[in-house]
Amino acid sequence: MRPRTDPLHRERAHDQHAHDQRAHDHRPPAPHRHSPAAGLLPVATLAAAALAICAASPAAAHANPVAAHPAAATCIASGTDAAINAALAGTGAEAVLCPGAVFQLGNPITFTAPNQKIYTQGLPTDATRANLVVTGSGLSTAIQGNGQPGVVVRNIQINGNRPALGVVSGGGALLEMGGAGTNQTVQNIYAHDTRSWSTLHFIEGRVTDNTPQCQGGQILDNQLGPAGTATPDATGVWADGISLACGGSLVQGNTITDATDGAIVVFGAPGSTVQNNTIVAKNQLLLGGINMVDYAPMNGNYTGTVVTHNTIDALSAFIKMGIAQGQQAWNCLTGTNYGATVTGNTLEGQYMGYGYAVDGVSDWTVTGNVDNSRHVGTQTAGGCFGSPRASQPAGYQVESATSSDLQPEFTSAVLTNALGTLNSPPITAPSGPALAASPSSVSFGNQAIGTTSAPRTVTVTNTGGSAAAISSITASAHFAQANTCGTALAAGASCTVTVTFSPAAAGAANGSVAIASNAANSPTTIALSGTGTGTATNLALAATMTASSTAPGYPATNANDGNGGSYWESVNGSGFPQTLTANLGSSQNLGSLRLRLPPSTAWAARTETLSVLGSTNGTTYTTVLPSAGYTFDPATGNTVSVSLPAGTAAQYLRLSVTANTGWPAAQVAEFEIYSSGGTTTPTNLALNAPITGSSHTQTYLAGNAVDGNTGTYWEGAGGAWPTTLTVDLTTAKALGSVVLHLPPATAWSTRTQTLTVLGSTDNSAWSTLVGSATYTFDPATGNAVTITLPAGTTDRYLRLSVTANTVQNAAQVSEFQVFGA
């Protein structure tokens, strides 16, 4: 939360400015479907100027991505802030710090021009990262991102030095980013002991029509905390881990340990995704794991904000609220937050207060979340203004959520000001053994079939009062483990479990490591997930997408949402080149690309001139394909396929666009990336093929399943089981796989469908190709399922026979794709 002197936030005024609507030559954005409620948010007065990141004002032209990274012959050795600031002179300047170097900061490091970078040479991720230590008596901010687009902070350590220097009242966050720039990145840093209210703050800049000026922040793979100090039931000097008010941002893969206010606080940040983060309370009370309670500065606008697949663990300290949703759960103020999705998250630990607490929201979705925690704490005081005492803590509780979709576990409760009146329980270690794994889940992302991932390490700790006897440690199919745990783990001791992923087939794989012991919580499990990829798998669906600039409402994430009707666009008239970069998470062997613009009914033909660049570290890029003009033609589905040179391998793949004959900005609806193994992108044999359904609902016709747009879909009649969908490929073909899609993650929640795949050569005699099975459509893997067909399959007709759907009482498919053998 933003700074305050008591558990309620102070009000802060926000600058507003008129927003000029621009005319597009193509389909306008969909109308806003919410009416922001009036009200005031509990946000503190923050003495900071608007800082750097957004797309509401024109961004500066971006340098060529290769030339923008001058080779650093030397690195900066240990010294002061002056040496680093001296290196940040001019657009694209880089302060390359020596491994192991230590810098004493009497003043903040300040970005002075676009596209500047600070990082440790070689990009280490361990204790050899250069260390910035705050030493100034009144200094709380180590790095200022003041209004500069494209700046990057990565692979360094930042010590706020709070234990030695104390708190700076009213000071800025340890890192102040965001504001009036675009697409800033903070990645692979270790930042701790902030002297102020937050560790990492992306500020909103000007707010227009409930939308922040700041857009496109990237907060990736950082280790944050401890942050602040707290006492169980009295006012402490709290601090956040991450404070996000920047729209269209991605917060992914971060570990926040021992924050005290909110580990991740979302101030609306419409269009942002917060996913795959781990929050742990070990030694300090934490008020909230993920907080979605603030009404200001977006007047409650959380539209398109998705919080998914995060783990919140009350390991050995109290967390008052796991995911707090709506400001009434937090305090006595009014105002309705609207438009967010909370799905697929997990609560762990023995000291959780309220789990998923919802009070003061509308048009809100909470589905598919898991609660494995024990709920403790007591309510002893009244609520607000004579209202009843809040209910005792439980996993899924709601007081006020209009026009919302909540999972069935929710029960009605009194939650107004529940956090403010909740008393903490005593924290005592169990007398017997108790095992805890950190992190409690591991996601491997994409991994090519027949290969093995890099190892991932999990720490297992005996948090109990006596030794744990370990009888077995096992991993499920597609995963393997090695460990240092032995047969006994002393009280307070730790061991490691190293896990790898080796997919045998394309598609999502889920499993676990199970640790059997004499602990009360045996078996202790570590959830595992990954996606096996073949040549027909679009690797970009699970990638992190960033851009050199983004027009309001057209973020980079539109380019990998699986929806050909949405698109990324750079800032109109801001000049070329403009870049779009996919981070695949690990180095992949790449074979081809497919670029899309929206369907032919909406857009006219145009040519975009672009080059393709690759990188293994996100810093140094080489040219994969030189600049060329590519024509997007409605007659061919506004799609361009591009083969990559043999031997192409990269973690980061970038498009650098230098011209567009149809609009003075770069535009991409889908940036699809495929692994090597073929000279061309695999062809979807079912695209625009004849298709029939045994039934349909309203206007959700069978043809939607072969139109190339995952934003449209077929839906069978409600309750009509089985329901079939049959595609005619016009001639018998050798077939290898089927890929089924549902609409993109921002629109649909996780569900399973049970179905059989059948084949026929004459549409009369049918044979079962793949027997009845249940398939999970998960937003974390693009809401897509890949089904491998038996070797030797040759058919003209393919049929899906669907018998169940866990969310809708009808069969649903947005794209029925068929690929050759």
Image (cartoon, rainbow, N blue to C red):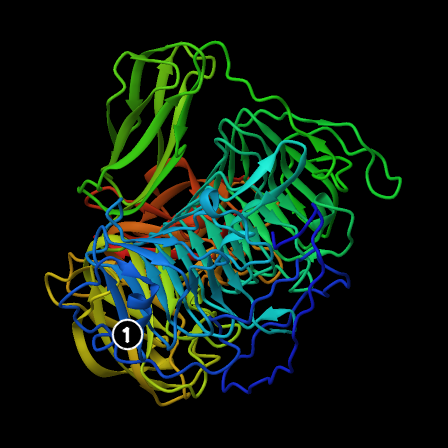
The x and y percentages for residue 432 are 46, 9
Residue located farthest toward the left when viewing the structure as drawn: 646
Quarter of the view holding residue 636 = bottom left
Amino acid type of disc 1?
A: Ala
Name the outermost residue toward the front: 137
Residue in the picture at 71% in, 56% down? 10
| Residue 240 at x, y percent in the picture | 54, 48
Residue 75 percent across, percent down from the top left: 19, 63
Q: Is residue 230 left or right of residue 33?
A: left
Tally of numbered tags = 1
The residue sitting at 25% across, 56% down in the picture is 732
Relative depth, front residue between 32 and 597: 32
Residue 708 on image: x %, y %: 40, 66
Which of 159 and 787 lies nearest the eye of the viewer?
159
Q: Which residue is mark 1?
A: 93
Residue 656: name its quadrant: bottom left
| Residue neighbourhood size for the residue with mark 1, other residues' Cα within 10 Å, grouped as few (<14), some (14–19), many (≥20) | many
Q: Is residue 717 visible?
A: yes
Is residue 715 in sight in this rendering? no
The secondary structure type at the circle numbered 1 is loop
Image-based side of 691 in relation to 686, left or right: right
Q: Is residue 220 left or right of residue 735?
A: right
**Considering only vertical position in the picture, is 514 above or below 98?**
above
Frontmost residue, 613 versus 195? 195
Residue shown at 57%/55% (left/top)? 696
